Amino acid sequence: MLGETIKQLRRERQMTLQNLADTTGLSVPFLSQLENDVANPTLSTLRKVAKALDASVFALLAQVEQSGGGAVKIEKASPRLSLTLPRMNSDLIFELLTVGFHSVRMQALRTELGPGVSTCDEPMAHGTWNDEEWAIILEGEVVLEVGQDRHKLIAGDCIHFHPVLPHRYTNVGTTTASLVAVMSPPTY
């Protein structure tokens, strides 16, 4: 399904595999394997492809039903759209909290990290200096690396920063940690 969605979005944007390769820095053979569901992409790879296709990572992974109009939308607790990739650790779960909201200004994710697990292998940057990320730690102990700084956070702590600075969250405790992050504009 992932490959078909990428292929469909690429064609809608009148891009060739070579155009997508040039934009993402990924090879044409790899992108072909991705479109044919042969390759297992990393989160970093999916972010590059999503950005090149002007879509979100979650848009690549699932077709979300558009909810009706109205000023109030409710996202039920179950089932929520979760990001799971074959190469990702099963102790890392990203859960989209704003599926039906389709806002172009913000996106909320709940992240669950097993002991010793990080959101990515190396700190990653996204967006511009005009973008913002805010998070609250719901449970556990997390270290957030932002640029050269490390911030130890515990349940109840909040943090706000510009995601253009390379960053990642790491569970430094012995139990599962969870947090909610809000990004403006959406990046997943």
Image (tube, helix red, strand yellow):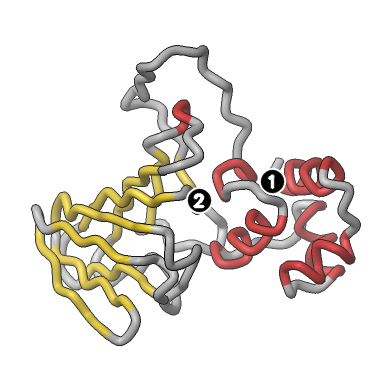
Distance from the alpha carbon under mark 2 to that under mark 1: 15 Å
Q: Amino acid at mark 2?
A: Tyr
- Give the camera-side residue of 123 and 147: 147
**In terms of sequence position, does the residue under pointer 2 or pointer 1 come before the other?**
1
Q: Residue furthest bottom?
A: 148
Expressed as whole percent of the image width and height from the top left, the position of residue 6 reads 75, 48
Residue density around tag 2, few if under 14, some if 14–19, many if 20 or more, within 10 Å: many
Which residue is depicted at the point 24% across and 67% down? 171
Number of numbered callouts drawn: 2
Could you tell whether 15 is left or right of 70 in the image? Answer: right
* 17 vs 93: above or below: below
Q: Residue furthest front?
A: 130
Which residue is depicted at the point 72% across and 62% down? 39
* 187 vs 107: above or below: below
Q: Secondary structure at mark 2?
A: loop
Check if mark 2's residue and mark 1's residue have beta carbons within 8 Å. Answer: no
- Give the camera-side residue of 183 and 26: 183
Q: Amino acid at mark 1?
A: Leu
Which residue has dot 1 on it? 2
Could you tell whether 178 is left or right of 75 in the image? Answer: left
Which residue has dot 2 on it? 188
Expressed as whole percent of the image width and height from the top left, the position of residue 69 reads 50, 13
Quadrant of the rendering where the N terminus is positioned? top right
